Image (cartoon, rainbow, N blue to C red):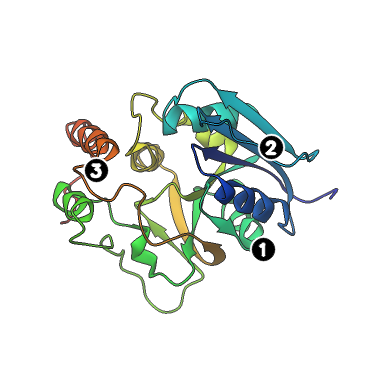
Amino acid sequence: MTGSPQVDVVILTWNDGGLLDAAVESALCSVGVDVNVVVVDNGSEPPATVAPHQAVTLLRNRVNRGVAAGRNQGAAAGDAPYVCFLDSDARLAPDCLASLVSAVDGNHPTAMAAPVFAGQAPQASAGRAPSVGRKLARGLGLATSYRPVPRGGRLPRWEVDFAIGACQLWRRTAFADVGGFDESFFYGPEDIDACRRLRRSGLRVVQVAGAACHHPPRRRHRRLVTGPGLRHGVALVRYYLRPLWPHPQP
């Protein structure tokens, strides 16, 4: 669609089955933007497949390279001015990408935008920088949300410290300027870390109320005692040993 903003949608998959098809189809059905989809199969067994489409590229890795490396790989495969990272179990409403692009379009400081997921409170997926206690509580299933940012009235969008990586739309130049996702993180918290570096560079992250996206209000590895959960816990320890934003709230 000539003249529409161009967006590369990067979908990372690992043994996701039919979920992947729904995510890809939702991106292709976007309106108001020109979409190319890059699917990165991070070592699925059997290998992931997608229906042939001129706007879909499938990259296959023999082994699971991790979330950060896989997403960076997908981003590098495109050159659109905007890049959206979408979880394989998420589904975009037709106008979601256009709403997110409108929030970061131009040269103003806002460089990344995220939706409010359908049926969920804004703080379920974005908010203030999470403290160690808040992340631990979420990992143990004792909390389901982050601390909200103060905002007044029914604003169409508002600034947040971070948004989870299930759906993030970046201005590509900003993503490149912060160095993409830190590949030393295999599974989390690469999304929070990227937002931190973006904000420390003087740019902004916003959450957009009118950007409709469906994503289950759960995490695939919610319990810390699972193998992936323990790996996630180790990554969190490494993350919190780094210099953080000042005084995160519990």
Q: Which of the numbered marks, if any, corresponds to residue 80? A: 2
User: Can you identify the residue that label 1 sits on?
Assistant: 95
Residue closest to the eye, 47 or 189: 47
Q: Residue at x 41, y 79 (%)?
A: 153
What amino acid is found at the position of numbered circle 3 in the picture? Answer: Trp
The answer to whether one can see residue 78 in this image is no
Q: Which of the numbered marks, if any, corresponds to residue 245? A: 3
* Percent position of residue 184, x then y: 34, 24
Q: Is mark 2 on a helix, strand or loop?
A: loop
Q: Which of marks 1 and 2 is in front?
A: 1
Residue density around tag 1, few if under 14, some if 14–19, many if 20 or more, within 10 Å: some
Q: Are marks 1 and 3 in contact (CB under 8 Å)?
A: no
Q: Residue at x 27, y 60 (%)?
A: 146
Q: What element carries label 3?
A: loop
Q: Nearer the viewer, mark 1 or mark 3?
A: 1
What amino acid is found at the position of numbered circle 2 in the picture? Answer: Ala
Residue density around tag 2, few if under 14, some if 14–19, many if 20 or more, within 10 Å: some
